[in-house]
């Protein structure tokens, strides 16, 4: 380039569009160190205020995805599908979803991350299972997927290395919530993971990154366009995170709830999201022709025990002991279990998902920083959803803590997150929109 990087910052600051060559220069320089962090920070701030065009965002994502290892899944048979959630509270979706989809013939090579903040990570949850190995070699990973249709492993540190550097700078420069930067971060890792099909679960609400439905739809549209522009079949669903999706919040507790899904006993909202995403995976895998056939197949896999059996097989293949499926007491256990009772009577009008997530994080179920250790045993289990009737003294939750003091503090946080009113309110709609290149944005009316 015949220009200085400072001139490129000035160009973006004034609302100019960066060419593919200029974006590549930026990301290559970020990774090599030839462009200093303070200049990337300035560019991030310019992007935050000026945004990026669809072309810029798509190429930025491409550069992030190729900045480290790109996973080669050619050894796997069939159409490879990946699923990603933008994160939430009691979002116990990936683990049962993968077992159901795989038991129906889908191929699900899942690479997941750890939790940060109030959003739980799939890898942390799986490490609650005695012996479960999340650090598989590529050959071992491929072997498990080819035998059982699915495996879940931790993302390696060499995938999308530019994203790690960008995220660290976004975190300290107040540029986290920039739509093109969010979309390129998520999709950069997904593209590098090597799947043919990407199904996205984009959350909106109090416990989500996007608090407005319109923001979540716009993010979903951007990520679908990125995926399609980079040769991946990509479909997104926008789902509710105004209250916790499931009932359990905490790593071992969410493993128990995942098993309950596969046994046919789980909160309706959680099951609806799982089955909606599973429908899409089975259709995109060309296993079924329509949603009705997909739903019938998935529900049959649960009812027959086929999905639960597949989960046990995957656990065993990854070194875990599936005994916990029928004996959950072998999972990490908290020393204190304390019921939380409603102080009044009426109807649950709201449950603040973020406040519930933070309550669990304060116990040690989540991380304030990436360096924090996770306590796999602690957390909480809710017994109510928005719209439920409760009476004074009615049990609405159970806290699982290490100490009595922690239990008292968590109880107060839970009570502060739940509002009980005199009049009934409608329940939150679980799935609000589907976004695909073929159909555009399809919004769902409340049922």
Image: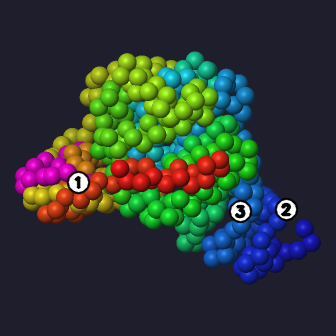
Question: Closer to the camera: disc 3 or disc 1?
Answer: 1
Which callout, 3 or 2, points at the residue further toward the start of the chain?
Answer: 2
Residue 180, labelled with which disc? none
Q: Name the side, left or right, on which 71 lies relative to 270.
A: right
Q: Which quarter of the picture shows residue 252?
A: top left
Residue situated in front as seen by the camera: 107 or 193: 107
**Residues at badges 3 and 1 in contact (C-beta under 8 Å)?**
no
Give the residue drawn at x 43%, y 32%: 96
- Residue occupying the point 65% across, 47% down: 438
Disc 2 target residue:
21
Answer above or below: position of 194 versus 218.
Answer: above
- In the rendered image, residue 397 lying in the magenta stretch gets the answer yes
Q: Magenta stretch: give its range.
A: 386-403
Q: Residues within 10 Å of mark 1 (few under 14, many from 20)?
A: many
In the picture, measured across the screen, residue 265 lies left or right of residue 71, that is left
- Asked whether residue 276 appears in the rendered view, the answer is yes
Mark in the foreground, 3 or 2: 3
Q: Residues within 10 Å of mark 3 (few under 14, many from 20)?
A: some
Residue 378 coordinates in the image, percent (x, y): 29, 44
- Secondary structure under tag 1 reads loop
The structure residue drawn at horizontal position 32% and vertical position 40%, both measured from the top left corner, is 268
Q: Which x, y percent locates residue 190?
A: 63, 45
Closer to us: mark 1 or mark 2? Answer: 1
Query: Visible in this render: residue 185?
Result: no
Q: Choose top left, top right, bottom left or bottom right for residue 405.
A: bottom left
Q: Earlier in the sequence, mark 3 or mark 1?
A: 3
Specify few, some or many for label 2: CA neighbours under 10 Å numbering under 14, 14-19, or 20 or more: few
Q: Magenta stretch containing residue 24, yes or no?
A: no
In terms of depth relative to the viewer, which is nearer, 375 or 399?
A: 399
Q: In the visual, does 343 lie left or right of 142?
A: left
Residue underneath mark 3:
54
Give the number of the disc on residue 387.
Answer: 1
């Amino acid at each position: 380039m015949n220009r200085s990087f400072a001139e490129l910052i000035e160009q973006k600051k004034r609302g100019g569009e960066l060419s593919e060559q200029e974006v590549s220069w930026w990301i290559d320089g970020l990774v090599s160190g030839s462009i200093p962090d303070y200049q990337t920070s300035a560019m991030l701030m310019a992007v935050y205020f000026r945004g990026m065009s669809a072309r810029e965002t798509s190429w930025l994502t491409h550069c992030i995805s190729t900045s480290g290892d790109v996973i080669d899944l050619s050894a796997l048979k069939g159409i490879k599908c990946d699923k990603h959630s933008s994160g939430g509270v009691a979002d116990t979706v990936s683990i049962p979803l993968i077992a159901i989809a795989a038991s129906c013939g889908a191929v699900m090579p899942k690479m997941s991350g750890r939790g940060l903040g109030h959003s739980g990570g799939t890898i942390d949850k799986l490490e609650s299972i005695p012996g479960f190995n999340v650090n598989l070699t590529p050959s071992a990973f491929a072997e498990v997927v080819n035998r059982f249709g699915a495996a879940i492993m931790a993302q390696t540190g060499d995938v999308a290395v530019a994203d790690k550097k960008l995220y660290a700078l976004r975190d300290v420069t107040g540029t986290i919530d920039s739509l093109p930067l969010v979309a390129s971060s998520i999709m950069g890792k997904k593209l590098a993971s090597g799947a043919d099909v990407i199904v996205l679960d984009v959350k909106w609400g109090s416990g989500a990154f996007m608090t407005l439905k319109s923001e979540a739809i716009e993010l979903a549209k951007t990520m679908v366009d990125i995926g399609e522009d980079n040769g991946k079949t990509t479909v997104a669903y926008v789902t509710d995170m105004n209250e916790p999706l499931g009932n359990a919040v905490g790593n071992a507790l969410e493993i128990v709830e995942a098993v309950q899904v596969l046994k046919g006993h789980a909160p309706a909202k959680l099951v609806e999201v799982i089955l909606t995403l599973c429908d899409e995976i089975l259709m995109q895998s060309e296993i079924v022709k329509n949603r009705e056939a997909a739903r019938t197949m998935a529900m049959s896999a649960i009812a027959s025990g086929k999905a639960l059996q597949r989960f046990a097989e995957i656990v065993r293949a990854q070194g875990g002991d599936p005994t916990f499926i029928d004996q959950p007491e072998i999972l990490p256990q908290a020393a204190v279990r304390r019921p939380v009772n409603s102080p009044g009577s009426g109807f649950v009008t709201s449950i603040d998902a973020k406040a519930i997530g933070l309550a669990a994080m304060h116990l040690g179920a989540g991380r304030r920083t990436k360096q924090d250790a996770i306590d796999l045993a602690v957390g909480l289990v809710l017994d109510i959803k928005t719209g439920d009737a409760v009476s004074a003294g009615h049990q609405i939750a159970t806290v699982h803590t290490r100490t009595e003091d922690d239990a008292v503090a968590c109880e107060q946080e839970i009570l502060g997150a739940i509002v009980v009113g005199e009049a009934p309110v409608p329940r939150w709609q679980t799935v609000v929109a589907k976004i695909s290149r073929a159909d555009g944005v399809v919004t769902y009316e409340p049922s």
